[in-house]
Image (tube, rainbow, N blue to C red):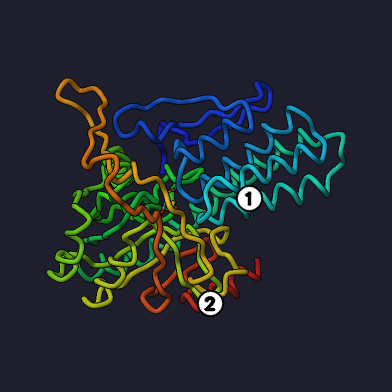
Amino acid sequence: MQTAFQTIAGDPHAGRVRILDQTLLPWQTVYRDLATLDEAAQAIRSMQVRGAPLIGVTAAFGVALALQAGDDDQTLSHALTTLRATRPTAVNLNWALDRMRNALHAGPADVRRDLAWREAQSIADEDALANGEIGRHGLALLQAVAAAHGRVRVMTHCNAGWLGTAGHGTALAPIYAAHAAGIAVEVWVSETRPRNQGLLTEWELAQAGVAHTVIADNAAGHLLMRGEVDLVIVGADRIAANGDTANKIGTYLKALAAHDCGVVFHVAAPLSTVDRKAADGAAIPIEQRSGEEVRRIAGRDAQGGLAEVSLLDPDTAVSNPAFDVTPARLIRSIITERGCVAPGQIGELAAAV
Ligand code: MRU
């Protein structure tokens, strides 16, 4: 998927990392420069960068930024601890930080700063390559439907496009591949309250010229029941060894409805999203975010400016779990850079890499 935008770009010479601020999308495209560990950690926490693979890439660059202030073990250890605490569910964060730690401990101490920039860039480049492969493998699923019906209607959730990664996206990668192959693809895009990441998906698909329709989250079950969806593809934030998958809150409801309606449900994710230490979904930590995200909503006002309004009083009790777990039994396959596997085989596939 070619796009004029880049989610993240490290610049070792300038000592900064440029990010596309996703808190202002789809209304404004603003790039920001991160120059310190704290700025990188805050960009992840505030969701200026978001999506499991991109969180991992940003954390890796965050280590490189931290080492500019000192390349000793203490600075490295502080950077790893600070970044690990930013968002608990997306395991790509831990994966990328473990990889940085291992590379930096193995490498010569006098070139640690250069090594950090190089390793972070490799993590970014490999993520884009892996997602390109997810697109290639997932394409076959869409081609099969198109061969039978002349078009494919896919439902997705949240944003698992190029915005959530270093390139191509995960759940959207097969959709972009199908579009490029001339297949008529139509996408159901759910809003994804409370943060409305569906608007990011809408923005991506509009730019790519892929036909799509936005729905309120609550409309998904109805469309599935009416036979208006051929398959569901979502991304993932952490996949347990048995294939249970954590993804954006609301994913589980779509999987349940898809199962009841006989619609196949696929997860698309690079193997960096697999946590072999988590035996099943119960071991996956679920991020609880601020109630303000439920109490307030952002959009454009009548003058075209950005505005936030309150839906609820500030003291209204709210709960805001950011992810849920879809049991492996509801998932037909996991589309990875190494091919599509049954959820029960994902631990084995990840171990082989
Ligand atoms: O809270 P977010 O926006 O970081 O959650 C994102 C998701 O749940 C995505 O589906 C997942 O990270 C895959 S992004 C390619």
Amino acid identity at mark 1: Ala
Residue 353 location (% of width, % of height): 65, 65
Which residue is tagged 2? 345
Amino acid identity at mark 2: Gln
Secondary structure beneath dot 1 equals helix
Residue 193 location (% of width, % of height): 28, 49
Give the residue at x 74% y 33%: 67
Which residue is tagged 1? 96
- In the rendered image, the residue lying farthest to the left is 226
Towards the viewer: 145 or 231: 231
- In the rendered image, the residue lying farthest to the front is 315
Name which quarter of the figure residue 278 lies in: bottom right
The reply, left or right, for residue 66 in relation to residue 133 is: right
Give the residue at x 40% y 53%: 173
Q: Which of marks 2 and 1 is in front?
A: 1
Taking 30 as reference, is 188 above or below it?
Answer: below
Give the residue at x 19% y 68%: 224
